[in-house]
Image (cartoon, rainbow, N blue to C red):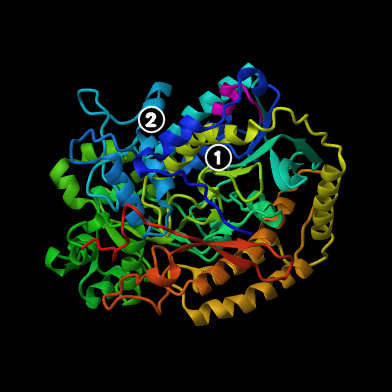
Amino acid sequence: MRLNAGIPEGPIADKWTAYRSAAKLVNPNNKRKLDIIVVGTGLAGASAAATLGQLGYNVKVFCYQDTPRRAHSIAAQGGINAAKNYPNDGDSVYRLFYDTIKGGDYRSREANVYRLAEVSNQIIDLCVAQGVPFAREYGGLLTNRSFGGAQVSRTFYARGQTGQQLLLGAYSALSRQIAAGNVTLYNRRDVLDMVLVEGKARGIIARNLVTGEIERFAAHAVVLANGGYGNVFFLSTNAMGSNVTPSWSAYKKGALFANPAFTQIHPTCIPVHGEFQSKLTLMSESLRNDGRIWVPAHKKDVDRLRSREIKPSEIPESDRDYYLERRYPAFGNLVPRDVASRAAKERCDAGYGVSTTGVAVFLDFAEAIERKGAGTIEALYGNLFQMYEQIVAENPYETPMMIYPAVHYTMGGLWVDYELMTTVPGLYAIGECNFSDHGANRLGASALMQGLADGYFVLPVTIGNYLAAEIHTPRFDPNSSEFTLAAEQVRERLVKLKNTSGKQPVDYYHRRLGKLMWEQCGMARNRSGLEDALVRIPQLREEFHAEVRIPGGLDEYNPELEKAGRVADFLELGELMVRDALQREESCGGHFREEFQTPDGEALRNDQDFSFVSAWEYKGRNEPADLLREDLLFEVVWPSQRSYK
């Protein structure tokens, strides 16, 4: 298989304009003849389904929740980037492009990233027109705040609930198209397989989560928008239902999986507090605008804090180590997420962690409250402070928050070309489930930007280039042999899982996998640990399929069966992630190999040997995947040692 990203010729600033000008069009009468399936109703899926429906296509959109409003996009807190330059501090499309390329540690495709920066301004205009309540200055103008990895303020926000407000805007657009009859919503469906007809994506197999029925749906093209796979680690900031199954089924049908090892660890999360915790809670990166991160400078104070002899406020300024400000004076507390996460780990590993477990650092707002006033801080972050207090039972206005890094976002995903099509014709991947824009590390406030860019502005243009040749293709019969075979294979897998007469629940294996992945393929990796994981994960997978216990029936509501299918996929994905991390003998962004670091502990890239996208091809059950490479060519931003000092 040869990888062709299909990047247009010409200067980078003209590529997207030139592409749109030459892209094939489908006239309105022909659009009515074409069916499109969209899997997922987060920002990417909802915006894509709404826009495609408005264009006149027949759209079927699927979610496993009871309503699209519950998609995990609601959990995004801090904001969305755009190059509007409202603060007049020097921002531009080029600077947003540059910061994103640099933030991804030069492991992104230039053309895709420039397009992302280019359409960012249109996103803000559209969302304002939808009524998204972005924060505003006193005079009514939209305001901005800063995020890590940038020295300008370009992040638009709605307090600490930006993702929720943006999703409500996309949901309103989607609801309008549902009411108009252009979009049909199928909720409470678990999409379990892709259906290919003569090598092209022509439909899906889904399980009705209420009745257990295996259902078939046909279309001329399929769009995956099912989000990331961070739940492979069990403990993450993802919703408990977030899964990799639609992407993984596409991978097994011929779609390449790219950069699976590139996992983002978010530095600002509430630390693990117990053995039976089911998920972790994110505290927005926006808090680092005003919160200062520190640990005690002396271990005697660490011991006194852990034994509760003293309060954090009793440690004088001279005995505090504001380690990000010390190590990275140019960016301070607003370094990118991977840098801040590793710095917190280094301090805790050195014995300066402040909680009873030793795995936490302080995020302190005392100076900001004194300078700006408690009312201003409450207006900016009030709901985040409330959430922290409800979970931890401490008032962050009076005592510093305790935070620690946690798995948050996955930069890897299905390989897509410039048109967002996978290596399976007619199968597209948008939002977090593709690999395309963030390289080895996503900058904060870029996930919402990518999801809406893909859904509102990119896919609706590029999919026409494919569908223009499909207008004479009749609608597909979901009772055809290809759909029947796929449905039977799905049911066989479920029956096999259900009939395993083991003793252990699904979560028992999910926790074990998550702990193994965190320890061997988490914030830091090394050859010994990765090789050990390559031995242990297949053993755990074999044990799971022999010993898992799934109560309930097949043809009924059965959440344990849902989880079992998802964990079965995670047990396969985990091995691919480890294999990818092992072959990439360098450190870049969120992929930190302990053997490859600079003398001062920073990531040490190897551009000569690893300036490529690793794209993996499925070769069969229990067979190692094949590695294909897409070489990254830098024509505008020349890779250099990433420095935030």
Residue sitting at x 35%, y 57%: 337
Q: Nearer the viewer, residue 314 or 108?
A: 108
Badge 2 element: helix
Mark 2 is surrounded, within 10 Å at the Cα level, by few (under 14), some (14 to 19) or many (20 or more) other residues, namely some
Query: Which image quadrant is residue 606 in?
Result: bottom left
Q: Nearer the viewer, residue 426 or 495?
A: 426
Q: Characterize the magenta stretch by its predominant secondary structure.
A: helix
When the figure is inspected, residue 21 is found, relative to residue 614, above or below; the finding is: above
Query: What residue range appears in magenta?
Result: 50-59
Tell which circle, 1 or 2, labels the residue nearer the N-terminal end: 1
Count how many numbered circles sit on residues in the image.
2
When the figure is inspected, residue 114 is found, relative to residue 183, above or below; the finding is: below
When the figure is inspected, residue 4 is found, relative to residue 339, above or below; the finding is: above
- Amino acid identity at mark 2: Gln
Q: Nearer the viewer, residue 206 or 465?
A: 465
Residue sitting at x 31%, y 59%: 638
Query: Which image quadrant is residue 350 in?
Result: bottom left
Q: Which mark is residue 71?
A: 1
